[in-house]
Image: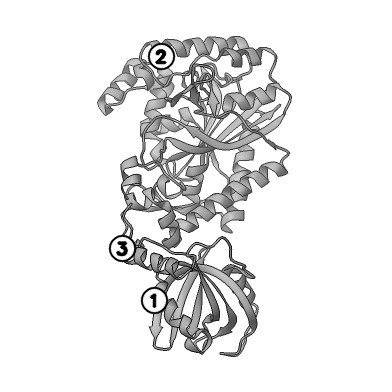
């Protein structure tokens, strides 16, 4: 590791003087945020202390020297405080401060709060202590590349207010989703991250080896199948917010490790889930942002004005695709659909040109980018998922919806399949897809079929991508901006 030589020299000088540059603890009476909240309720005269013997701590942002007095800005938790240091109060320690303390160092300070003539809240420092000597010079964050920011997020959070704000929105969004679901009677549960059979989605897994069992296991690609086991076990309203892992693309809307919220509600169907989803997003947006009106960046550089406070549009996949084609999709032959796909250079999942998979591919290409306002897309071909209940009145379709906002899928929901015989059949069809080369085909899960065989009540299920929801709330166009630590090459992380 290469450290700043001058800072390393100062570190050794401090130690030679018996000063520990990394003490174990520092007593704080008020955080900087608490100081600012307290000061906001007061209007005192300049230079007259209104709170004495205050102790706080923060990281040095900059130092402005003025002979026998200096101003220093420190920050903590995104809040800043100005310090006023003078020879009068510190004596020889004033010179030591200017010599040993630099930008990026963490210090503890004690003194009296007052306002300057310009109305700046300040702390007249009567004592200070170095709490952590930074051995790397703080960068100019405005010149940092996105690659550096994503690889070294701790620097990004320190010096980039927008990055810190995105994290605050993220964590508050998760908190408010939890509170909303608790208020609706859902119980938060846990499911295993390591699984002998991955499932619940169509994706490539990450594999690992369990030495104690001498077996290959998988990181979960979904929360679904174990949450449904809770439903079988008599827990009627369950949810989980957790990491899932898919060995797939890294781009502006995908990261191999991401966060999902999934819930399952016994004796409900996808209509109930649709109402719940709309109300949840509206409620959470209002709580976290103070508004339901969002401004979402689009791929072409424009911005979409979206109001999740308005009722979400509800349309079937067939109606939307027919509108895009200018003719009823049910009247389009399989051969004509294949020609359309060939002309667009598109191939259905697994290279299988079944009617349902061709419809899905055409829909993704022609319709989804145009779904700007919140839209529930209903009733998918049965080939698109092996875990969904067949439609009660439309043969060949399943009771599924996906929610799209600004052209991006935000949520996926089913009236869940609870017929073990049909589930067995659909799993076997997925195995045929795998034999044809579809590496994302759903594996056969014997134990899950066994669980259904004990009887699972009618159930509605929902999955929401937390990262994409936070992207929508923060108005950013890259998933990396809302992930605390996005996946980047180890060479970037370790290389500095």
Q: Residues within 10 Å of mark 3 (few under 14, many from 20)?
A: few
Label 3 sits on residue: 5
Q: Which mark is residue 99?
A: 1
Front residue of this view, candidates 87 and 409: 87
Label 2 sits on residue: 434
Spatial distance from mark 1 to mark 3, Cα to Cα?
Answer: 15 Å
- For the residue labelled by badge 1, is the local secondary structure a helix, a strand or a loop? helix
**Residue 291 seen by the camera:** no
Q: In terms of sequence position, does the residue under pointer 1 or pointer 3 come before the other?
A: 3
List x then y, in percent, for residue 288. 58, 55
**Residue 404 seen by the camera:** yes
Q: Is residue 159 left or right of residue 289?
A: left
List x then y, in percent, for residue 383. 47, 18
- For the residue labelled by badge 2, is the local secondary structure a helix, a strand or a loop? helix
Q: In which quarter of the view is residue 50 placed? A: bottom right
Q: Residue at x 34, y 41 (%)?
A: 490
Depth-wise, is mark 2 or mark 3 nearer the camera?
Answer: 3
Front residue of this view, candidates 128 and 242: 128
**Residues at circles 2 and 1 in contact by the CB criterion of under 8 Å:** no
Front residue of this view, candidates 351 and 322: 351
Q: In which quarter of the view is residue 108 placed? A: bottom right
Q: Residue at x 47, y 48 (%)?
A: 484
């Amino acid at each position: 590791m290469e450290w700043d030589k001058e800072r390393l020299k100062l570190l050794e000088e401090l130690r030679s003087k018996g000063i520990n540059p990394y003490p174990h603890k520092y007593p704080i009476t008020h955080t900087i945020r608490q100081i600012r909240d307290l000061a906001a309720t007061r209007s005192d005269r300049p230079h007259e202390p209104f709170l004495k013997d205050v102790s706080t701590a923060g990281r040095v942002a900059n130092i402005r020297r003025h002979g026998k007095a200096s101003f220093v800005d420190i920050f903590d938790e995104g809040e800043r405080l100005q310090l006023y240091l003078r020879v009068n109060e510190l004596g020889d320690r004033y010179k030591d401060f200017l010599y040993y303390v630099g930008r990026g160092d963490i210090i503890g300070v004690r003194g009296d709060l007052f306002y300057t003539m310009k109305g700046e809240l300040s702390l007249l420092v009567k004592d200070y202590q170095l709490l952590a000597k930074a051995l790397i010079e703080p960068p100019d964050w405005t010149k940092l590349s996105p690659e550096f920011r994503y690889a070294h997020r701790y620097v990004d959070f320190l010096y980039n207010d927008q990055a810190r704000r995105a994290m605050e929105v993220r964590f508050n969004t998760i908190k408010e989703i939890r509170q909303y679901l608790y208020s609706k009677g859902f119980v938060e549960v846990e499911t295993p991250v390591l699984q002998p059979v991955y499932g619940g989605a169509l994706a490539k897994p990450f594999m690992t080896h369990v030495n104690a069992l001498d077996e290959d296991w998988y990181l979960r690609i979904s929360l679904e199948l174990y949450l449904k086991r809770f439903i079988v076990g008599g827990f009627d309203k369950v949810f989980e917010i957790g990491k899932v892992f898919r060995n797939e693309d890294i781009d502006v809307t995908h990261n191999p490790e991401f966060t999902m919220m999934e819930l399952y509600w016994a004796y409900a169907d996808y209509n109930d889930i649709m109402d719940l989803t709309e109300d949840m997003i509206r409620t959470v947006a209002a709580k976290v942002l103070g508004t339901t009106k969002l401004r979402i960046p689009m791929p072409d550089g424009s911005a979409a004005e979206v109001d999740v406070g308005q009722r979400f549009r509800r349309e079937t996949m067939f109606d939307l695709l027919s509108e895009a084609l200018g003719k009823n999709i049910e009247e389009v032959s399989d051969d004509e659909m294949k020609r359309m796909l060939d002309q667009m250079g598109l191939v259905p999942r697994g290279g299988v040109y079944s009617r349902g998979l061709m419809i899905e591919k055409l829909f993704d290409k022609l319709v989804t980018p145009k779904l700007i306002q919140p839209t529930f897309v209903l009733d998918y071909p049965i080939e698109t998922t092996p875990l969904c209940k067949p439609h009660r009145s439309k043969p060949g379709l399943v009771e599924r919806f996906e929610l799209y906002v600004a052209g991006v899928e935000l949520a996926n929901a089913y009236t869940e399949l609870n017929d073990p015989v049909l589930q067995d059949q659909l799993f076997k069809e997925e195995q045929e897809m795998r034999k044809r080369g579809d590496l994302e085909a759903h594996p056969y899960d014997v134990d899950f079929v066994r669980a259904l065989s004990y009887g699972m009540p009618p159930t509605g299920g929902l999955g929401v991508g937390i990262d994409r929801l936070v992207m929508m709330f923060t108005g950013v166009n890259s998933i990396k901006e809302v992930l605390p630590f996005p996946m980047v090459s180890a060479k970037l992380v370790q290389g500095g």
